[in-house]
Image (cartoon, grey):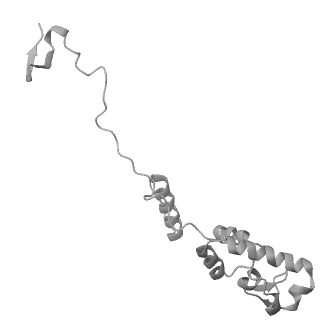
């Protein structure tokens, strides 16, 4: 791990988290050993780092972000990534209309709205009246056979 200041300038110091876990402070830079606050921050960082799954550690390594805490670094990576897949499969009418309007404006043209006229409209008054109950056909089953009979 490479160390940077809060401003993001490199300190030209690095360490391996495994050295900290094994308390092998002799191989580490003297800046860690001199200041107790630096030592506690490094210990906290290594503890959080070792608590992460291997895949999350790999994501952080490849992400190239500067972070104070590995969990905050993961949150930054997640916020920076745009969603790759969407549950929305098809465009709606409004979206298609907006896209066509913007395309027409870019080309310097215009858009005309065309609608279908309804030629056949249902009128309740024009519908035939229901026949009286005595003239209605009845469908049913009698002993497994389907029959149609006229009431009356």
Is 138 or 70 nearer to us in this picture?
A: 70
Is 86 or 9 nearer to us in this picture?
A: 9
Question: How many tags in the picture?
Answer: 0
Is 78 or 112 nearer to us in this picture?
A: 78
Name which quarter of the figure residue 125 lies in. Answer: top left
Name which quarter of the figure residue 121 lies in. Answer: top left
Is residue 68 in view? no
Q: Residue at x 34, y 42 (%)?
A: 117
> Viewed as shown, does residue 25 lie left or right of 131?
right
**Residue 135: percent from the left, percent from the top?**
14, 11
The correct choice, above or below, for 29 with respect to 46 in the image is below
Is residue 64 in view? yes
> Viewed as shown, does residue 38 lie left or right of 56?
right
**Residue 109: percent from the left, percent from the top?**
49, 65
> Viewed as shown, does residue 60 lie left or right of 33?
left
Q: Residue at x 78, y 87 (%)?
A: 24
The correct choice, above or below, for 136 with respect to 17 in the image is above
The correct choice, above or below, for 30 with respect to 147 in the image is below
**Residue 38: percent from the left, percent from the top?**
87, 80
**Residue 31: percent from the left, percent from the top?**
88, 88
Which residue reaches farthest right? 35
Report the quarter where the C terminus lies: top left
Report the quarter where the N terminus lies: bottom right
The correct choice, above or below, for 48 with respect to 29 in the image is above
Q: Residue at x 15, y 8 (%)?
A: 134
């Amino acid at each position: 791990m490479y160390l940077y200041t809060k401003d993001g300038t490199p300190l030209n110091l690095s360490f391996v988290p495994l050295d900290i876990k094994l308390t092998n402070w002799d191989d580490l830079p003297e800046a860690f050993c001199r200041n107790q606050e630096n030592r506690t921050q490094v210990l906290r960082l290594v503890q959080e780092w070792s608590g992460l799954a291997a895949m999350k550690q790999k994501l952080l390594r490849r992400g190239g972000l500067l972070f104070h805490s590995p969990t905050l670094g993961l949150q930054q990576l997640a916020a920076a990534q745009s969603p790759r897949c969407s549950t929305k499969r098809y465009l709606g009418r409004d979206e298609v209309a907006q896209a066509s309007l913007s395309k027409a404006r870019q080309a310097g043209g215009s858009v005309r709205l065309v609608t279908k006229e309804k030629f056949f409209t249902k009128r309740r008054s024009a519908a035939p009246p229901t026949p009286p109950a005595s003239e209605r056909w009845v469908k049913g089953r009698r002993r497994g056979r389907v029959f149609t009979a006229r009431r009356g």
